[in-house]
Image (spheres, grey):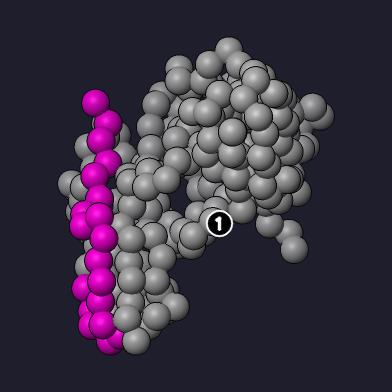
Amino acid sequence: EDQVTQSPEALRLQEGESSSLNCSYTVSGLRGLFWYRQDPGKGPEFLFTLYSAGEEKEKERLKATLTKKESFLHITAPKPEDSATYLCAVPRGDTGNQFYFGTGTSLTVIP
Amino acid sequence: DTGVSQDPRHKITKRGQNVTFRCDPISEHNRLYWYRQTLGQGPEFLTYFQNEAQLEKSRLLSDRFSAERPKGSFSTLEIQRTEQGDSAMYLCASSGRTTPLYEQYFGPGTRLTVT
């Protein structure tokens, strides 16, 4: 059965303190792993898509990596404005049109 | 703004009433998705349209929920005889010919509160 598990559930960092968020997945035939950022009361904002093991993508202080079993979202020298919930998702089902989301990691960056 | 838009942003209704939400996707996108999100959870898939055809529906979607996408443009999601358990954020997403396969872009959501 398809599974997406994110850890930790919550993370508090001092400004400038780098860390990583984890997304473990079990899905037959990976068609991509997607990272989103979600601010309170808003819809998820697309960040990255990773398609194959070894792939990496970067955007400002964020870097996403992918292995055959998990993905990491590395946050380098975070700022308070990086505070949000970070969600990962994988397409599932015969067509891949249904996204299966993890429960997210709530990140708080303290000034 | 050329992103996905949803209306209303907030809806408070009494149990047993019907509600309808609207989603306007990014104009060149032919694929449209509805999700539901409760507090502390990730979005949960409800249904998928390609153009005007509803091609996929979650097994979790009860008969009280119906969605339409006339003419393959905007979409509506109706919930009949609302229950307190329907309280959630309802999210719409779109993708299409100008985006990589499977990549979905979300709207701001409609927050439903059933009292």
The percent coordinates of residue A51 (x first, y second) are 35, 50
Q: Give, as a single range, the part of the protein colored magenta.
A: A1-19
Query: For this rendering, which residue is in front, A94 or B43?
Result: B43
**Dot 1 alpha-carbon crowd within 10 angstroms: few under 14, some 14 to 19, many 20 or more:** some
At horizontal 61% and vertical 53% (from top left) the residue drawn is B108
> Which quadrant, please, contains the N terminus of chain A?
top left
Give the chain letter at badge 1.
A
Q: Which residue is mark 1?
A: A42
A54 on left or right of B59: left
Query: Was residue B115 drawn as part of the magenta stretch in this picture?
Result: no
Residue that lies at the very extreme toward the right in this rendered image: B71
The percent coordinates of residue B109 (x first, y second) are 61, 48
> Which quadrant, please, contains the C terminus of chain A?
bottom left
- Three-letter code for the amino acid on which mark 1 is drawn: Lys
At horizontal 79% and vertical 27% (from top left) the residue drawn is B70
The percent coordinates of residue B49 (x first, y second) are 63, 29
User: Which quadrant holds residue B23?
Assistant: top right
Count of marks, rendered view: 1
B31 on left or right of A41: right
Query: For this rendering, which residue is in front, B49 or B20?
Result: B20
The percent coordinates of residue B19 (x first, y second) are 71, 29
Could you tell me if residue B99 is visible in this image? no
B21 on left or right of B35: right
User: Which quadrant holds residue B71?
Assistant: top right
Under circle 1, the secondary element is: loop
Query: For this rendering, which residue is in front, A51 or A72?
Result: A72
At horizontal 53% and vertical 35% (from top left) the residue drawn is B87
